[in-house]
Image (spheres, grey):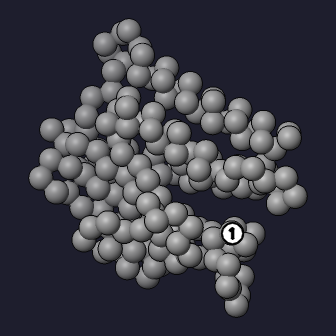
């Protein structure tokens, strides 16, 4: 019970932080859309690192195989919804070197198929600019303890890769 409560607490804190950033009354604190691809890349890297870090901590500290009700990546999808609503930043998971646990995580277009190839090759990110949209795919490392759920028929415990997709409009 402690682990499920801890995950809920972390998600609630993240949601409140994201909501608070979007509800600032002072116009000087409003986050404008990125003005350049370089700025969009910096934001995507920051978001990727934040989300990957939260995911790794939740898995390390709160995933209890004896008492599992919720998986951390699913908990973060609530955060993704809030990022989309507040900031027009779209985020979702991408299957790279894992089993299909959720069909919504399969690559859906050329950029995402290319991202799977790039991330599976060992690179940390793949990015593209399409019209007024910046797209970023970042690697998420799955350590041996993650493989119990993400790779059912495994013959080794070597790390695998999943991905995090982020997109945001450009002016």
> Measuring 42% from the left and 16% from the top, which residue is drawn there?
23
Side of 153 where 18 appears, left or right: left
The residue nearer to you, when weighing 103 against 91, is 103
User: Residue 27: horizontal and vertical position, in percent?
Assistant: 31, 13
Q: Quadrant of the N terminus?
A: top right
Indicate the position of residue 132 as horizontal and vertical percent values: 15, 47
| Quarter of the figure with the C terminus | top left
Number of marks drawn: 1
> Can residue 164 be seen from the camera position used here?
no
What residue is shown at x 70% (from left), y 36% (from top)? 8
Picture quadrant of residue 59: bottom right
Q: Residues within 10 Å of mark 1 (few under 14, many from 20)?
A: few
- The residue nearer to you, when weighing 106 against 97, is 106
144 relative to 19 in the view: left or right: right
The answer to whether residue 67 is above or below residue 169 is below
Q: Secondary structure at mark 1?
A: helix
**Residue 153 location (% of width, % of height):** 67, 85
Vertical comparison of 119 with 93: above or below: below
Q: Residue at x 49, y 29 (%)?
A: 18
Q: Which residue lies under the disc numbered 1? A: 149
Q: In this rendering, would 63 be left or right of 52?
A: right
Direction bottom: furthest residue:
155
Work out which residue is located at the far left of the displayed protein and give it: 131
Question: Is residue 28 among what the camera can see?
Answer: yes
């Amino acid at each position: 019970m402690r682990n499920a409560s801890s995950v809920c607490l972390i998600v609630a804190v993240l949601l409140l932080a994201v909501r608070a950033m979007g509800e600032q009354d002072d116009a000087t604190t409003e986050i404008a859309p990125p003005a350049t691809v370089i700025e969009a890349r910096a934001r995507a890297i920051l978001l990727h690192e934040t989300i990957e870090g939260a995911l790794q901590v939740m898995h390390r500290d709160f995933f209890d195989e004896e008492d599992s009700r919720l998986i951390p990546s699913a908990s973060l999808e609530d955060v993704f919804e809030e990022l989309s609503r507040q900031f027009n930043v779209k985020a979702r998971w991408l299957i790279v070197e894992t089993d299909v646990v959720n069909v919504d995580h399969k690559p859906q277009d050329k950029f995402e198929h290319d991202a799977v190839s790039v991330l599976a090759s060992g690179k940390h990110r793949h990015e593209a600019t399409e019209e007024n949209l910046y797209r970023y795919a970042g690697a998420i490392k799955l350590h041996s303890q993650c493989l119990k759920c993400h790779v059912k028929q495994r013959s080794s415990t070597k790390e695998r890769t999943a991905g995090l997709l982020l997109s945001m409009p450009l002016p």
